[in-house]
Amino acid sequence: MSAGEEAAPAQPQKTEEQKPEENQVTEQKKEEAPAAEAPEEKKPEEEAAAAEAAPAEPQQPEVTYKSLVLSAHGGYDKVKLQTKKGQPKPKAGELLIRVSACGLNFSDLLARQGVCDRLPSMPVSLGMECAGTVEELGEGVTDRQVGDKVMVFCKYGLWQELVTVPANHTFIMPEGMSFEEGAAFLVNYITAYMIIFHFGNLRPKQSILIHMAAGGVGTAAIQLCKTVKDVTIFGTASASKHEALKESGVTHPIDYRTSDYVDEVRKISPKGVDIVLDPLGGSDTCKGYNLLKPMGKLVIFGAANLLTGQKKNIMALAKSWWNQFSINAMQLIGANKAVCGYLLGRLDEETELLADVVATLLELYKQGQIKPKIDSVYPFEQVGDAMRQMQEKKNVGKVILVPEAPKEEAKKEEN
């Protein structure tokens, strides 16, 4: 050992007397220690047996729903049936609706062709109206309940099994109204009511010309005119529909295909009529204006003359533009006439105005004075046939789309 190193202190040796005491303390510590030791590992066979014994958690089926989607502008085949995954979630102020029936309107046909500009970028679902059942409430909705049967109006997007919509765009269906009637109610009756009474100011003993009188707006307009005493109704439609028009209350049906409706009106009423409802556009707007009596009103609310085939017709667009009605303020003053333009799609945010109109219409429905006339009901799979029925003007009343085929028709197809 060198001079700089010190010897390490010697460790005391354990004696036999000390060992039992130390053993006793050690055992006591073991007893006091918490039972935190790792559990004994199970054998693979035991794990497999435990897994079999545990109840299996039920798997939730994936939510899917049907949607009619416009993929590109063009013919009937551009609206395709798709199956979407997942359930839409209503935002604050919205409702989730399970749709039972949808309405088909001329604006949907124009949108398909790319003639009107009310749609966002494609692909997009068409449809301005539907009827169904409330399935879920968004935050803050207090005036609707799950299970309520409602009618819905929006700019687009309602040709689906499930839709989320603002609660203030829905209206409670009255007792006894079917979903098909609910889907045929809002667009046609709101339009007809506002153009006849808000713009036209129809009064007893006046006369009115209704074009496309057998269509959805036409049938609604006829019923509303019948709520005013002694109104003379001229209605244009093909000859095959005249009997139905007479039964509904049209005083003078006119076959626009075989005769000039202007001449036919003049034969009966040389001075013309008090109100003209014009869903046609083009040269027919000029004819309508010239048919007005002094203090008469022309209400333009469509451009059906643009629909000459499945696809957009450039020649029809050019012809309509060339024949476009034009008049200045001084001419109106001298003629003592009024010209009005109406587009329901641009009133979708006027919720208070529309709610007042719908309240009036529902009261008339409850009184039995108005009732939607259903022409035909098509399942989503036959949307092309439904659009053809309307575009070729074969319908008398409203064309309806439903997610599922009606039970009776489904049975017939099976047989």
Image (cartoon, grey):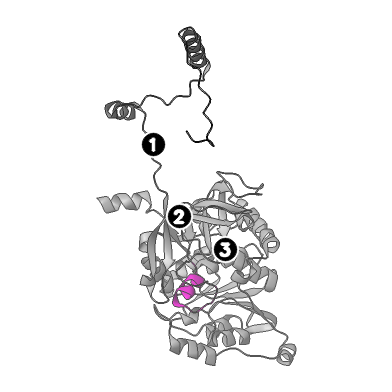
Most distant residue in the front direction: 3
Categorize mark 3 by other alpha carbons within 10 Å: few (<14), some (14-19), many (20+): many
Rendered residue at 52%/35% (across/down): 5
Tags 2 and 1 touching, CB below 8 Å: no
Rendered residue at 38%/66% (across/down): 80
Q: Mark 3 points at which residue?
A: 154
Kindly state the secondary structure of the residue where label 3 is placed: loop
Q: Nearer the N terminus, badge 3 or badge 1?
A: 1
Q: Mark 2 points at which residue?
A: 161
Tags 2 and 3 touching, CB below 8 Å: no
Of circles 2 and 1, the one toward us is 1
Q: In this view, does 335 lie above or below 150?
A: below
Q: In this view, does 140 lie above or below 384?
A: above
Rendered residue at 56%/55% (across/down): 151
Q: Nearer the N terminus, badge 2 or badge 1?
A: 1
How many marks overall? 3
Of circles 3 and 1, the one toward us is 1
